Image (cartoon, grey):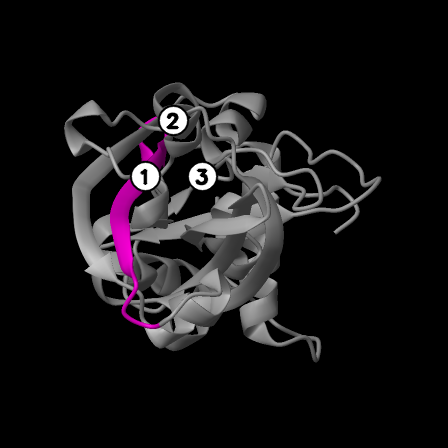
Amino acid sequence: MVKFVNNKSRVPIYQIIRDQLARDIESGDIKIGDRLPSERTLAEQMGSARETVREALFILEGEGLINRRKNRGWYFDPKRVRYDPTHHMGTFKMIEHWGGKPSSIGFGWQETRASPSIARMMDCEPGTELLFHRAIILWNDRKIAYEENHLLKSYFPEFSASDFEHPISDFLKARFNVSPTQVGFRARPTPLYGVVSTGLEVTPGTPGIFLTRIKACDGKIMQIDRDFWISGALEIVVGQFPQPSTLGHDDSD
């Protein structure tokens, strides 16, 4: 396990602490699902300032090896979905593909109107009537993404929220015989705040990935799908690339 840092080199102390924690993970001293010692305990064990330890933890969080859970500390949980946006697959199917059990916590459907930004993506007028749904997506019992869906209400005149079951792609196919095709994709880094960090039970400011997908059917844009992922739970990969190791990161890193 972690131990006192005696730095005789010019390597920053936070990097040494990061490397020590990574070795503990590699060796199995820290196992999947384990809670790491508190920042104060790590600082005492390593003879370092708490702020320096926190820098090391932030690096590991950015690498996707650990994650912060609100008011519960740091955990080693590297389970990660690998997503290829050129071969779109629904979130539930992606989780299943990577060995997880998907589920969701839905917050219900509501009628709303298109904001200017949504209207631009949907190629409709601001204020156009939409159907709006949001949910938390889980990998087994871990909350990994906050999802928003905007549907063009005129495309689904007999929509009934009481019939809905996740995932939305299966519901649209079964209920309306509609299978939207992804025609646009965007990914941006983002810190997670507000309803997103609260819903995912992570510390505000946790690194995230913001995905936006534009979907159409018969040439008509009818769905905007927006996901806010915990960064350590998702990687975007296109083309031939080595599979992640059992720890969830690439051995070449």
Q: Position of residue 96 (x, y in %)?
A: 51, 22
Q: Is residue 112 above or below residue 245?
A: below
Q: Left of 147 or right of it: where is 162?
A: left
- Dot in front, 2 or 3: 2
Q: Marks 2/3: CA distance? A: 38 Å
Q: Name the secondary structure under disc 1.
A: loop
Does label 2 or label 3 sit earlier along the sequence? 3
Query: Residue shown at 17%/41% (left/top)?
Result: 108
Q: Marks 1/3: CA distance? A: 40 Å
**Amino acid type for the residue under numbered disc 2:** Phe
| Any part of residue 200 in sight | no
Does label 1 or label 3 sit earlier along the sequence? 3
Q: Nearer the viewer, residue 97 or 3?
A: 97
Density class for disc 3 (Cα within 10 Å; few <14, some 14-19, many ≥20) is many
Q: Which residues are magenta?
A: 126-142
Query: Residue shown at 21%/24% (left/top)?
Result: 163
Q: Position of residue 2 (x, y in %)?
A: 48, 50
**Amino acid type for the residue under numbered disc 3:** Asp
User: Pointers 2 and 1 in contact (CB under 8 A)?
Assistant: yes
Residue under circle 3? 77
Q: Position of residue 186 (x, y in %)?
A: 58, 61
Q: Is residue 252 above or below residue 103?
A: below
Query: Residue shown at 23%/66% (left/top)?
Result: 194
Residue under circle 2? 176
Q: Is residue 140 magenta?
A: yes
Q: Name the secondary structure under disc 3.
A: loop
Q: Is residue 147 magenta?
A: no
Q: Name the secondary structure under disc 2.
A: helix
Residue under circle 1? 156
User: Pointers 2 and 3 in contact (CB under 8 A)?
Assistant: no
| Any part of residue 167 in sight | yes
Query: Residue shown at 33%/61% (left/top)?
Result: 39
